[in-house]
């Protein structure tokens, strides 16, 4: 996946159609609460502007119905934030549409060093359907296509797949953020320095099953925490109280345990659990070893498990982390996730390579204000997970190779 990148081609006086991921979180007033995705695309945006390119940005935000404009999902808050970051750049926002007459006029009148931002692609149902006609309209805006939206690269939406396909014969390149994501989530992992440790958490085994199976042949240790651990523990015959268990995944969990035993990969499950009656700061708290009593649910890994996991992480030279160890948003069930994050940071400072998957993992390290202390924190949740599964992305395979 060694794609040619935007900084490797001439953009002067050319229209660069860049698919970005401005799917940023908003508060109740519609203000951006985390602009990390916007900020991480700035090097690609600045590269085009500095070299007098004409930049057309397109993105989705949230899940509108696809039947036209919905104010709650307008890209205007992201546009306002970009204007704050680029106060000296003319930025034209095509509010309410992306393929109508206003969009066409804005693109036709753009000048060197300026930006046009199209409104939410998903106001049109054709975006999610990968519609070729819709894609052709978008493709007509650009002399160059740039994919800078790793978080959506596992989806063959029109702007991700049909647009670059329609632009065959024109330069189709990766943005600098996409290239960085691919380097860490594909190349670094494929050529990992050992010991190689994977830390997997989150809620459902079904969400991580493909990643676990893929990693079994590639890592030295897999450390399993979060609610998904209780499906494994239940499969081993232990009582888990009221902890979340995917009953339909017990057989698969048992198979993974057996497969790990047949390999050199070590599979670590929690040996103690911080439990509560409910997810609340006020709930009674009790630590159980092995089996959990009825009425209690596992909400975080216990202190012995933390010590066991941090010992493995401390030896690692490559660490991949996808999914929190517990309900990190609620005290006191944030301790395990925080301690694991700290141990990965410590390993990173000693020279290990650490890759944090997007989604809940990225939200956790942002919650603990530790984002800048890992080698890489991904901007894509589902995309990073599929990359860990070893899947190729058709949207990336379409891009020019260097």
Image (cartoon, helix red, strand yellow):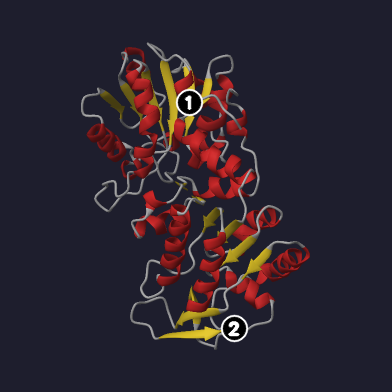
Asked whether 91 or 356 is in front, the reply is 356
Give coordinates of residue 322: x percent, y percent: 53, 56
Asked whether 237 or 343 is in front, the reply is 343
> Is 57 situated above or below 218?
above
Q: Earlier in the sequence, mark 2 or mark 1?
A: 1
Q: Nearer the viewer's eye, disc 2 or disc 1?
A: 2
Which label was assigned to residue 329? none
| Image side of residue 271 versus residue 327, left or right | right
Q: Would residue 200 be seen by someone viewing this image from the given angle?
A: no
The image quarter containing residue 165 is top right
Asked whether 153 or 199 is in front, the reply is 199
Query: Which SS class for mark 2?
Result: loop
| Image side of residue 16 versus residue 322, left or right | left
Instruction: Please identify the quadrant where the C terminus is shown.
Output: top right
Give coordinates of residue 364: x percent, y percent: 41, 59
Which label was assigned to residue 146? 1
> Is 218 situated above or below 221?
above
The residue under label 2 is 290
User: What residue is drawn where x is 63% and y is 62%?
Assistant: 221
Instruction: Please identify the quadrant where the N terminus is shown.
Output: top right
User: What residue is drawn where x is 70% and y is 61%?
Assistant: 265
């Amino acid at each position: 996946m060694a794609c040619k990148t935007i900084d490797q081609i001439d953009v002067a006086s050319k229209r660069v159609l860049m698919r970005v991921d401005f799917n940023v979180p908003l508060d109740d007033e519609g203000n951006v609460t985390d602009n990390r995705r916007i900020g991480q695309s700035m090097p690609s945006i600045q590269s085009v502007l500095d070299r007098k390119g004409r930049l057309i940005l397109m993105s989705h935000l949230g899940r509108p119905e696809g039947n036209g404009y919905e104010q709650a999902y307008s890209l205007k808050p992201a546009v306002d934030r970009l204007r704050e970051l680029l106060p000296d750049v003319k930025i034209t926002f095509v509010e309410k549409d992306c393929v109508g007459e206003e969009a066409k006029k804005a693109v036709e009148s753009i000048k060197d060093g300026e930006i046009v931002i199209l409104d939410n692609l998903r106001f049109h149902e054709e975006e999610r359907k990968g519609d070729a006609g819709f894609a052709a309209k978008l493709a007509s805006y650009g002399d160059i296509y740039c994919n800078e939206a790793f978080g959506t690269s596992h989806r063959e939406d029109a702007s991700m797949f049909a647009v670059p396909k329609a632009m065959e014969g024109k330069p189709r390149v990766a943005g600098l953020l996409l290239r960085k994501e691919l380097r860490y989530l594909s190349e670094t992992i494929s050529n990992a320095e050992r010991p190689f440790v994977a830390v997997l958490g989150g809620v459902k085994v079904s969400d991580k099953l493909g990643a676990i199976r893929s990693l079994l042949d590639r890592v030295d240790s897999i450390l399993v925490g979060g609610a998904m651990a209780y499906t494994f523990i239940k499969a081993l015959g232990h009582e888990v109280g009221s902890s979340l268990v995917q009953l339909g995944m017990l057989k698969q969990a048992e198979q993974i345990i057996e497969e790990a035993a047949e390999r050199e990969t070590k599979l670590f499950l929690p040996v103690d659990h911080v439990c509560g009656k409910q997810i609340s700061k006020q709930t009674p708290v009790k630590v159980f070893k092995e089996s959990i009593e009825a009425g209690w649910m596992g909400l975080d890994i216990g202190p012995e498990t933390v010590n066991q996991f941090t010992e493995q992480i401390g030896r690692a030279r490559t660490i991949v982390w996808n999914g929190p160890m517990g309900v990190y948003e609620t005290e006191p069930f944030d301790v395990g996730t925080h301690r694991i994050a700290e141990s990965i940071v410590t390993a990173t400072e000693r020279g290990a390579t650490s890759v944090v998957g997007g989604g809940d993992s990225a939200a956790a390290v942002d919650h603990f204000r530790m984002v800048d202390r890992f080698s890489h924190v991904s901007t894509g949740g589902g995309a990073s997970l599929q990359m860990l599964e070893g899947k190729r992305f058709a949207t990336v395979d379409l891009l020019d190779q260097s």
